[in-house]
């Protein structure tokens, strides 16, 4: 599946499909999409909708390792959380009407009001909690660029390439990958660091990213990515 390649001295190259993916030093950011308790925890909102949350929980260990390697490399790290203001003033009626009538955004859920900022369920799981210096973007939509200052933050840091991780593969990850691609960013998706409640959506979602010569971006995995992230760490120079 992956091409053999020789890393260059200055720009680590991640073994990926359809071609190796460059990690230009200082120009890559790690984006962690919506690793929130509402989506991931047993007994949470995701599970109450009938989803198998173990499919998403499997993302946590490899993503934790990628996060640690990105931190060691001094990379810009951005976490997102999908959610809305307590008064629902940023919730379009069309989005509010979606889902089961008994469990809509803003309703009381197992971990507080569903997808409402400030509630326990809206926050990021403990294993991947942001640390000081990392950016947290609260987004009202599926894409991380929509109605947020993500583009401004990336421009301010001279970022050209993104490693996009998180959940769910076919919804918020895919929307963000597509938004980023249209804005001219090169995007890598590590396959085991994104997750879907539906195995077929996971497989097809990843295939869609790298299809047609990388129509939306590149796909690799955490092991291959971490090997090259280590080349970026100050101690490796
Ligand atoms: C969904 C997301 N699935 N973060 N949100 O509604 O993918």
Image: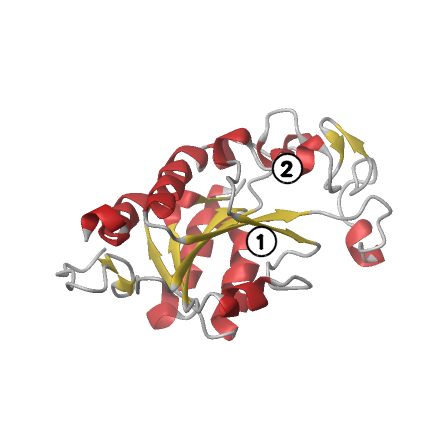
Say which label, 1 or 2, has the lower sequence index: 2
**Which disc is residue 200 wearing?**
none
Q: CA distance from mark 1 to mark 2?
A: 16 Å
Rendered location of residue 37, percent (x, y) = 61, 33
- The crowding category of the residue bearing disc 2, from other C-alpha atoms within 10 Å (few below 14, some 14 to 19, many at least 20), is many
Find numbered disc 1 in the image and state the secondary structure of the residue it sits on.
Answer: helix
Residue 39 located left or right of residue 202: right
Residue 164 seen by the camera: yes
Q: Quadrant of the N terminus?
A: bottom left
Residue at x-position 56% and y-position 67% = 151
The one of 170 and 233 positioned closer to us in this rendering: 233
Q: Residue at x 52, y 40 (%)?
A: 130
Q: Position of residue 102 (x, y in %)?
A: 83, 35
Q: Which residue is mark 2?
A: 123
Q: Secondary structure at mark 2?
A: loop
The residue shown at (63%, 63%) is 149
Question: In the shown orientation, is residue 220 left or right of residue 177?
Answer: left
Figure check: 158 above or below 67:
below
- Labelled disc at residue 172: 1
């Amino acid at each position: 599946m992956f091409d053999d390649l020789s890393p260059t001295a200055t720009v680590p190259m991640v073994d990926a499909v359809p071609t190796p993916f460059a990690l230009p030093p200082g120009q890559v950011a790690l984006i962690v999409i919506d690793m929130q308790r509402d989506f991931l925890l047993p007994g949470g909102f995701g599970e109450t909708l009938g989803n198998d949350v173990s499919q998403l929980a499997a993302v946590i260990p490899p993503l934790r390792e990628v996060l640690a390697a990105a931190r060691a490399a001094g990379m810009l790290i951005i976490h997102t959380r999908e959610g809305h203001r307590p008064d629902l003033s940023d919730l379009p009626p069309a989005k509010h009407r979606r889902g089961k009538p008994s469990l809509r955004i803003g309703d009381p859920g197992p971990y507080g009001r569903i997808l409402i900022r400030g509630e326990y369920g809206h926050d990021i799981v403990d294993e991947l909690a942001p640390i000081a210096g990392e950016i947290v973007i609260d987004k009202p939509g599926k894409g991380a660029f929509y109605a947020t200052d993500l583009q401004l933050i990336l421009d301010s840091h001279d970022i050209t390439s993104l490693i996009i991780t998180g959940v769910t593969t076919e919804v918020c990850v895919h929307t963000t990958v597509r938004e980023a691609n249209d804005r001219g960013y090169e995007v890598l998706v590590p396959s085991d660091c994104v997750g879907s409640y539906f195995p077929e959506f996971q497989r097809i979602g990843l295939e869609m990213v790298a299809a047609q010569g990388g129509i939306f971006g590149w796909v690799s995995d955490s092991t291959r990515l971490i090997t090259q992230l280590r080349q970026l760490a100050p101690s490796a120079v």
